[in-house]
Image (cartoon, grey):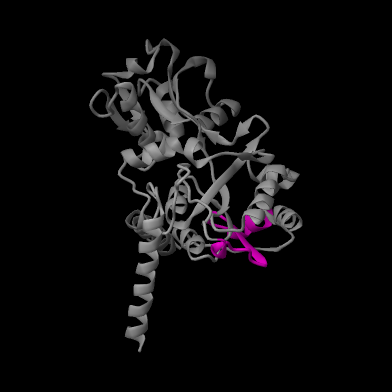
Amino acid sequence: MKRIMTFVLAALFSAGVATAAEECKNRGTLDEMYCDENMDLVADTPKDENDWKDPRTLVFTYTPVEDPAVYKDAFADFQEYLEEKTGKKVIYYTVQSNAAEVEAMRSGRLHIAGFSTGPTGFAVNLAGYVPIAVKGYPEGFQGYNLIVVTKKDSGIKTLDDIKGKRIAHTSASSNSGNLAPRAIFPQYGIVPDKDYTVVYSGKHDQSILGVAHGDYDAAPVASDVYNRMAEAGRINPDEFNIVFTSPKFPTSSFGYAHNLHPDLVKKIVDAFHSYRFTPAMQETFGKADRFYPVTYKDDWKVIRDIAASTGTSYNQAGLKKMAEKEAAKAAAKKAKQ
């Protein structure tokens, strides 16, 4: 009987997918469960009103961290605001990994969420997630840039001048310290390891200090690290030149499941855009005081470009790889304890 039920459910799912495939005029890179006929790169609201969800209780979470309780408490005031704006009970659901968070929204157990920068792409393609905001300020969203720093007397005035030089990348897995330069620099006619020698420093601050001490000719680093070092007096910014600045990389995104009732979506969006952080939230989130409006199509382009250049695909295979990495990292951490 179990085998028969499995076969029947599989057949029904396949039939549903086939029907959806016939009805959808554009899907892009989205999973076959979703459609993107308005070309904004995120899942459309279902055409059939019977597929709209209007749950009595809304489930909310934030990207998994080492101590989930910290952020559960940090978002308590915003949860109350969501309840006031939507007229529904809102509960916080703690997730243990990015992959688990994606699966929770895909299965319908999660309605509103904050996803980390990289996993946002998986949530969009595989879970019907619609990003609408990131933490920010009146003038823009919270984020950082890839910058290339060099000493003022190095003779390097433009990005093109780093050709033939000894350049410090941070580590193989670093976004702004390695992956982003490898994705972005070729667009300017410069290929790392080919047009210049890559030397791994280990960390952003070590790259910056190495440039200051003459160990490296230049270094691609995260702008926020550079700024913090300058503010702390660890470096004198007057001794450096910044010869390249990338588009801003967004921090964690916030959004909702695509199949929520449109009236409910309007209330959720309004809640995000009208809410102002409490002093405690501002302290927790780097002085950000609001959720700043963004779109996945425009503001996540630089992240998608980096993912594409490094062979990361926002599909089930890519999600499996991410889950395996998270599991290995958790196991290694447990082994050290």
Which one is nearer the viewer's eye here, 17 or 237? 17
Q: Is residue 203 visible?
A: no
Image-quadrant location for residue 327: bottom left
What are the residue bounds of the magenta stretch? 49-74
Q: Is residue 191 left or right of residue 69?
A: left
Image-quadrant location for residue 192: top left
Give coordinates of residue 325: x percent, y percent.
37, 56
Image-quadrant location for residue 134: top right
Find the residue positioned furthest to the bottom: 1
Q: Is residue 239 visible?
A: yes
Give coordinates of residue 313: x percent, y percent.
34, 48
* Residue 143 position (above or below residue 16): above
Q: Quadrant of the N terminus?
A: bottom left
**Count of all numbered marks drawn on residues in the image:** 0
Which one is nearer the viewer's eye here, 153 or 190? 190
Residue at coordinates 70% horizontally, 49% vertically from top-left? 271
Residue at coordinates 52% horizontally, 24% vertically from top-left? 235
* Residue 115 position (above or below residue 227): below
Q: Is residue 205 left or right of residue 270?
A: left
Give coordinates of residue 296: x percent, y percent.
50, 41
Q: Is residue 262 left or right of residue 194?
A: right
Which one is nearer the viewer's eye here, 139 or 71? 139
Which one is nearer the viewer's eye here, 53 or 179? 53
Give coordinates of residue 183: x percent, y percent.
34, 33
Asked if residue 208 is among those painted magenta in the image, a careful observer would answer no
Q: Is residue 106 left or right of residue 86?
A: left
Residue at coordinates 57% horizontally, 31% vertically from top-left? 228
Find the residue positioned furthest to the right: 84
